[in-house]
Image (spheres, rainbow, N blue to C red):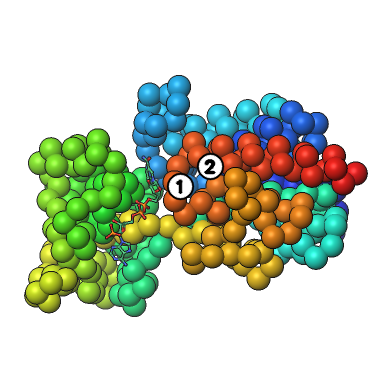
Amino acid sequence: MSDTKHTKLLIIGSGPAGYTAGIYGSRAMLDPILIQGMQPGGQLTITTEVENWPSRKEVQGPDLMVEMEEHARAAGTEIIGDHIASVDLSNRPFTAIGESGTTYTADAVIFATGAQARWLGLESEEKFKGFGVSACATCDGFFYRGQEIVVVGGGNSAVEEALFLTKFASKVTLIHRRDELRSEKILQERLFKNPKIEPLWFHEVEEILGSEDPLGVESVSVKHVKTGEITEIPCKGVFIAIGHKPSSELVVDVLETHMGGYVVTKPDSTATSIPGVFAAGDLTDYVYRQAVTSAGMGCMAALEAEKFLSENE
Ligand code: NAP
């Protein structure tokens, strides 16, 4: 049986932006409802050490997210394990339909649905996903004990994944299309010092090769971006860490977006193109994309929602 729940403030998403919006929304007495989505806690639940969350020199990503959830709940946010399938933002109250069958109506909405891993887009990548190809070292690294692995990318995610995978792998080759990493300098220093990691500069993955029965990766064929020379690198695991794309599927047809799907917000604000609808975190941020900046945007969104509601009551 379907049921309907009304709230002054609906928050969709459960990363640092969503939970922080929950804390601030609760303290503004808005009794927010927060819908967690498919991956409660978001991207930090598939990372390991977080070393740049102020006040915590080192904390495990999943632990940090459990603490944020507990904080939001303790502040008064109603946290619901549901996934929103569609939204109607054409009238107030806004409507969101959950896959559970519940309809949520809200006077203001904060979208904080984050971002998801980008893939290379190769047919062979698709074929071996789950059979040697992964975008989550913390989820799948354990399966590659004593094996050779490649990581693709040159940002913080790629370097962190490469470092993490040395716990299991006999060798990690970091394949990057340039000869300069864009990750934090401290991570680069650790990477270059690690004897198990070998960077392979100026290369792109052409194809992932493997066996059919059982399905499994045996090697990657890589191309030198300048000379075009093709080389084959033996490996059992391929970890893709080439960035993220915003999870804006719910709103891409109704809110203004740019830069490949990031929701546009007004300058110095989380307000979107629809009054009463706000966006925070990686869904809208194509520049910083840090846990702490997402949390900051979650705070802004809740404060702006509170102002909007008090002006429109
Ligand atoms: P990113 O910083 O956007 O880096 C993506 C990397 O993948 C770049 O090196 C890029 O190469 C490469 N790349 C992109 N498309 C490619 C393709 N088709 N083929 C081969 N290589 C490709 O993404 P990210 O590492 O996922 O990080 C996303 C955001 O989260 C960043 O803002 C990052 O700082 C943040 N983050 C922070 C932490 C932390 O603070 N500890 C941890 C993880 C992520 P080019 O360099 O040539 O463009």
Q: Which callout, 2 or 1, points at the residue further toward the start of the chain?
A: 1
For the N terminus, the quadrant is bottom right
Callouts 2 and 1 close, C-beta under 8 Å:
yes
Which residue is nearer to you in this view: 145 or 57?
57
Q: Which residue is mark 2?
A: 294
Three-letter amino acid code of the residue under disc 1: Arg
Expressed as whole percent of the image width and height from the top left, the position of residue 30 reads 80, 36
> Which label belongs to residue 49?
none
Residue farthest to the right, as pictured: 313
Q: Is residue 262 left or right of residue 19?
A: left
Expressed as whole percent of the image width and height from the top left, the position of residue 249 reads 60, 65
Vertical side of 258 occupied by 82: above or below: above
- Would residue 259 be visible to someone looking at this image? yes
Which residue is nearer to you in this view: 138 or 76?
76
Q: Which residue is mark 1?
A: 289
Looking at the rendered structure, the secondary structure element under dot 1 is loop
Report, in whole angstroms, how far the alpha carbon at label 2 lies from the one at label 1.
7 Å
Expressed as whole percent of the image width and height from the top left, the position of residue 286 reads 47, 54
Which residue is nearer to you in this view: 313 or 146?
313
Residue 306, by quadrant, is top right
Q: What residue appears at the point 67 percent right and 56 percent down from the top-left corner? A: 272
